[in-house]
């Protein structure tokens, strides 16, 4: 990977398989890839690959005819421009594994205070959050529709063709473009082909549409919290005197190693209603997600906790997953903005 | 997770439904008589081959043993 232009071949590096089709002038026709937490191949199939290749050849014919619009080449960017990756991997003659690029990029941003975790840690949102179920064996064809997509006017049988004005030929294109949407957006524009007629629709984005399962990104900077929780509903928050838009959550599970590591004194049934004096996040109504967005992995926080009706404060120290981690610089807190 | 990438001028005629002309000899990155694809591992070579042959490139990033 060390000689690859990351600027041109930009994709979510936590994909296990990823493909590009391009021409000799390095114009990319399509991306083929995309995954979910379920599996690295959950969005891949021979049927969808065949469709992708067919669409790519259509683009290539346009290119050969001089009818393919020129696209600007992204700024070149190579793995050795990531200092920690160069020092720890490239200079040591080790293989530059795809995910290491993402890991070291994000860790450096965290230490520089420039990490934007809401988009750089929560990568590749799932288009299913719109209420779309696609039949990828038939391209980007909508099989079932509900929720925001249904309210926005999408119908079964529609074929997605554009996202935010950019053509999408494959699920890889779709997921890549969806990932590029700024996280504070409340709606997106989709282009569809409805029985041969082009239709443009605006679809509302649900709250926390950007959130994804982080389990297969565990070598990034995700703070390890060692507990699970459930969000409180509005009525419960009101009854407890907590802000309805706050991120209060009830602890449902404590990992045994949290005790062994002496990272926290939480108990099942505790309600976390504040982190370092903050009770409301502009991004989330989950205390877990708030901690992942706003605290440095390995750093200490002060929790506001309701325990058996009493408000108490207690420390929480998150953990870091990876032996490869760079040293934590206290105070190098990410901004969650967009 | 082991990174690897390979690239290949399209030789996926049967997959993509593309007619291909008969070739007097196997070309780099092209399919062989046995239907197997010969993947390249040199990006510059693939670009040159794509330019020479007029074929597009199919590039793979793979994590595999």
Image (tube, coloured by chain):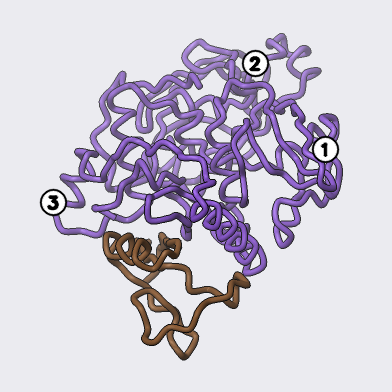
Work out whether disc 2 and disc 3 sit on a shared chain: yes
Marks 2 & 3, CB-CB < 8 Å contact: no
- The chain ID associated with circle 2 is A
- Residue at left 56%, top 25%? A183
Which of the chains is purple?
Answer: A
Which residue of the protein is positioned furthest toward the front in this rendering? A65
In the image, is residue A195 above or below residue B4? above
Q: Nearer the viewer, mark 2 or mark 3?
A: 3
Q: Is residue A33 visible?
A: no
Q: Which mark is residue A91?
A: 3
Instruction: Give whichever of discs 1 and 3 has the lower sequence position.
Output: 3
Mark closer to the observer (1, 3): 1
Q: Quadrant of residue A151?
A: top right
Q: Nearer the viewer, residue A80 or A14?
A: A80
Contact between marks 1 and 2 (CB within 8 A): the answer is no
Sort mark 2 into few (<14), some (14-19) or many (20+) by Cα contacts within 10 Å. many
Please say if A29 is above or below A318. below
Mark number displayed over residue A269: none
Q: Position of residue A88 (x, y in %)?
A: 19, 48
- Give the chain of mark 1: A
Upstream in the sequence, badge 1 or badge 2?
A: 1
Q: Residue at x 75, y 27 (%)?
A: A202
Q: State the image quarter where residue A78 is shown.
A: top left
Instruction: Please tell me whether mark 3 sits on a helix, a strand or a loop.
Output: loop
Q: Quick one: label 2 or label 3, which is nearer the N terminus? A: 3
Mark 3, chain letter?
A
From the viewer's perspective, is B33 left or right of A198? left
Residue nearest the viewer, comparing A211 with A230 = A211
Which mark, by number, is residue A246?
Answer: 2
Instruction: From the viewer's side, name the closer residue of B12 and A139.
Output: B12
How far apart marks 1 and 3 lie (CA) works out to 51 Å
Rendering colour (chain B): brown
């Amino acid at each position: 990977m060390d000689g690859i232009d990351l600027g041109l071949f930009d994709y979510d590096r936590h994909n296990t398989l990823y493909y590009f089709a391009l021409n000799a002038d390095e114009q990319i026709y399509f991306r083929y890839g995309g995954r979910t937490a379920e599996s690295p191949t959950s969005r891949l199939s021979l049927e969808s690959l065949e469709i992708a290749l067919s669409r790519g050849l259509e683009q290539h014919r346009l290119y050969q005819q001089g009818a393919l619009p020129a696209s600007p080449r992204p700024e070149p960017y190579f793995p050795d421009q990531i200092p920690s990756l160069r020092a720890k991997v490239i200079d040591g003659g080790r293989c530059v594994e795809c995910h290491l690029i993402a890991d070291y990029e994000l860790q450096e941003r965290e230490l520089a205070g420039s990490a934007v975790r809401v988009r750089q840690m929560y990568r590749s949102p799932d288009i299913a959050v719109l209420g779309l179920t696609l039949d990828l064996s038939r391209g980007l064809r909508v099989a079932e529709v509900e929720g925001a997509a249904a309210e926005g006017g999408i119908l079964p049988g529609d074929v997605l063709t554009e996202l935010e004005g950019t053509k999408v030929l494959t699920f890889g294109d779709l997921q890549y473009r969806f990932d590029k949407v700024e996280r504070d957006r409340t709606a997106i524009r989709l282009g569809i082909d409805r029985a041969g007629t082009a239709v443009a629709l605006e679809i509302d984005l649900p709250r926390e549409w950007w959130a994804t399962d982080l389990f297969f990104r565990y070598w990034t900077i995700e703070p390890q919290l060692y507990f699970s929780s459930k969000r409180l509903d509005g009525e419960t928050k009101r009854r407890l005197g907590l802000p309805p838009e706050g991120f209060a959550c009830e602890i449902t599970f404590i990992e045994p190693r949290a005790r062994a590591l002496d990272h926290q004194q939480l108990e099942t049934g505790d309600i976390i209603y504040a982190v370092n004096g903050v009770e409301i996040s502009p991004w989330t109504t989950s205390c877990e997600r708030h901690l992942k967005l706003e605290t440095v992995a390995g750093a200490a926080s002060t929790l506001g906790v309701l325990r058996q009706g009493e408000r108490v404060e207690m420390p929480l120290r998150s953990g870091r997953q990876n032996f490869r981690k760079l040293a934590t610089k206290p105070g190098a807190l990410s901004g969650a903005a967009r | 997770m082991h990174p690897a990438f390979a690239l290949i001028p399209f030789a996926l005629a049967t997959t993509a439904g593309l007619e291909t002309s008969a070739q007097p000899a196997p070309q780099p990155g092209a399919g062989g008589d046995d239907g197997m694809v010969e993947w390249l591992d040199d990006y510059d070579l693939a670009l040159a081959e794509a330019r020479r042959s007029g074929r597009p490139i199919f590039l793979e990033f793979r994590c595999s043993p």
